[in-house]
Image (spheres, rainbow, N blue to C red):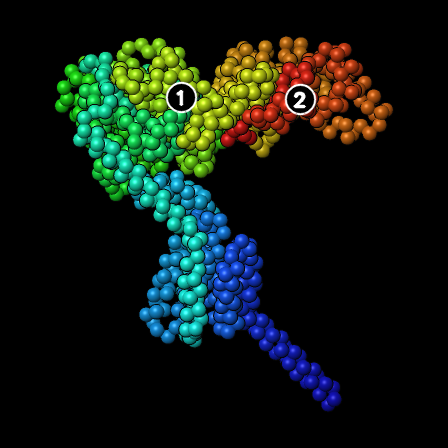
Amino acid sequence: MNVHGGRGSHTQHLRKMTGYMDMSLSGFISRLPLLLFLVLFTAFTAISVRYASSASLFMQGLALCSGILWLACGLLYSHTAKLLFITLLLNLLSLFAYKELLAVNAELSSLMVISNIWLLFYLFSQLEYAFVRMVSRVLAITLAMISSVVLLTGLYYGSMDKELVFALLQTNLQEAMAFLGFTVELKAIILLAMSAALIGLWLSYSANKKRVTSPLFALLLISLSFFSLLQPNSFKGIRNVLAYIEQYHFELEQLRTVIDKRKSSASKYSVTTNSENSLHLLVIGESLSSFHMSSYGYRRETTPWIAQSQPIQLQYAYSSHTHTMEVLTLALTQSNQYNQLDYFDSASLIDVLNQAGFQTAWISNQISAGEWDNHISALAFESDYVRFINTNVGKSDFTRKQDDALIDELRRYLTNQDLNQNHFIILHMMGSHIAYCDRVKGQAPSLSPAPHYLYKGKQNDCYDETVVFADQILSRAYELVSNTPHFSSMTFFSDHGEEVFEKLGHDSRQFRETMAEIPFLIWSKEPKPALEKNQDKVFTNDLLFDYLLGLTEINNELKSEHLDIGSDRYSLPLNQAKTLHASIPISSLTRHKTKVNLNQSDNLMAHRVNTIGSMDEAKHQGFRRIELDLVISDGVMQVGHDPQTLTGQSLEAYLEYENRYFEALWFDIKNINEQNLSLVLETLEFLDSRYQLKSRTLIETSSTSPRISELSEKGWTTSYYLPTGLPQRLTSQEQTLAYVRKLRNQLKSQQMRSLSYDISLFEFVDNHLRESIIKPLGLKMNTWTSLRARDSALFTKLEKVGANQGFENVIVIHTTRFRL
């Protein structure tokens, strides 16, 4: 009995304990939303202190009151803790979005108003009145969606400055959506999904049947927001945006006023021309980077006609900005980056040509909602003949007609004109504008798939197809105008470039050189010796005005002879050339900074040039020497640093692209040994017969095999790779002396011609190898460094580490998007 009684008592005790545990667990779970809210509120308060520290004492007091109201709601209405927690998360989303895109410094008053609005949404969503609850939910959803879009915009494009505002005012809804689609990434998808989830949870929790009535809290929040809005710094970011919008429309109105004056008054310019019965065609491309043109060295055959037609091609042409309006308002007026004139108060190219007696025409596939839709349209409508073929004018950048429709319009124009007069015609293409695939929709693909080792698979096939399409259009335009009786010239340039590989488009605030590198091509009936002489000089397309006045033989006081690329007197020194409206010197770009260093030394070599894209960028920057890694794999010498980075490109395929361009090559063969030496030698001998390698190639190996001498006996220049960690392994004088003796015998038996090592070994080599090995064996020296080729202080740094002393080759790091 006692035993059974003891068992029953024990069982009851266990049940009680289990019940207590269940109650404790359920109690904890029920309080978890409140705990999460308190934790998040604490973090929110800690972040807010940073903004409050620079605010006035009055604003700090208002912020403190607002924080107390948030905390009071959490403690008094704990049954709505889930809703309050989600509300605080949405509040943080809105605050962060405003800060990223619009905030100017620490706008505590603006952030407090946003915070108060979310707390009001929380309170109103719990009222007895269904209509108020519905309105609060609609407004909350709207604010959350706007916050998500604002945050994405801020994350991708930075704060809302003048350039972004102007760009958006030039952009219609579909173009904006196309650009968002172009740049969308995983983080954007995650952010939008999280926002949608928060909105869904907020709506679910706000349906709580136990209502909250707190008119006093709502009144206090409205009062706090009112006093915050009265502060001078309140929503300063939004007020700045409104000021930029006002400035945009002011400049447009100024331009309209000037053009109206030109139309209604006699010419204030003294304009004559020596040209008679001439026809000039100007073709303006869109977002076309010269890097993607095979005539400029691109490896995909994108511009076969241009290459075959052999125009005068400016090698160093740059845009004055990366946005169309900012470019063309300078290019088509007397204003430029160097004369400080306002474009809206400057002579326009069209007006000058009109006054000189030219028949002017503007045929465009770009958007226009009318004469004053934007600055470009304002300039276009100065022409005698204006035709916009974009059938979605004023609505979107989706074009029902491709750019080839411009040729039909051009043919129609020429058919209906008296060609015995002077004519100047502008074709404005949609070109390579974002939503690249839309630009070539319906066109048969003309490019073969690009192997991975070209551009690491980063190429955009649609973009490259737009370049092919532009080449075809230029071919047809040239065929048409060159067969007219008085053809004089055809000029093609792009408004700006594009960064395709990094998916940055042409956003000026994420500036890359490719956004400003443009084609500039001239086909002329008559020889242009000055243009040919100047084609390797730097040129920016805001100087188009001066060039075209010279081309059309206009005589007036508006032209600056030294800024006309077609003149013998043209002079734009590299240290004066600018882009991005004079905010970035051309000389500061990687291409030119690297060239400056390369011109000071003939032994600098580009590091790890293992892709064709990397090779092209080394060539573009002026390198004449490159180093590449080789791995023997599957019986083939393949390009790559290790098995993980092999792309299937053989050394033979690589050299087909190199095609004897570089004066020196450094082959770092990673795994040469006695078993594959015969294969290596056979391959090298074959390739030497095709690409003349022996006289310009260094064969580097870490092999200690005496059979390496077979390479030297065949006339190859070999170099032994000195292990980088060598000094750390040689811990005593005896070990060092023994190693030196062994190394000397090895190098002698291998018939090594040179030694190569990391520059960190310079002191070791100088102290232990120079007198005992290098001089007696007559070895050359080669080294590699981690220094950047574009570094303005490169030679100071080379001298500091000893890399300026007697090396045949010095490897430096070149800038490339395609390193493997």
Q: What number is the disc on residue 574?
A: none
Residue at 68% across / 17% down in the picture?
805
The Cα atoms of the two marked residues, 1 and 2, are separated by: 35 Å
Left or right placement of residue 428 versus residue 651 in this view: left
* Sequence-first disc among 1 and 2: 1
Q: How many marks?
A: 2
Give x and y (percent) for residue 80. 47, 70
Out of 813 and 254, give the one closest to the viewer. 254
Out of 649 and 177, give the one closest to the viewer. 177
Mark 1 Cα shell of 10 Å, populated few (<14), some (14-19), many (≥20): many
Left or right placement of residue 292 versus residue 621 in this view: left
- According to the picture, the residue beneath numbered tag 1 turns out to be 539
* Visible residue check, residue 156: no
Left or right placement of residue 768 versus residue 23 in this view: right
* Visible residue check, residue 502: yes
- According to the picture, the residue beneath numbered tag 2 turns out to be 799
Q: Secondary structure at mark 2?
A: helix
Residue at 40% across / 31% down in the picture?
581
Residue at 35% across / 47% down in the picture?
242
Q: Secondary structure at mark 1?
A: strand
Amino acid of disc 1: Phe
Q: Is residue 93 above or below residue 503?
A: below
Corner quadrant of residue 180: top left
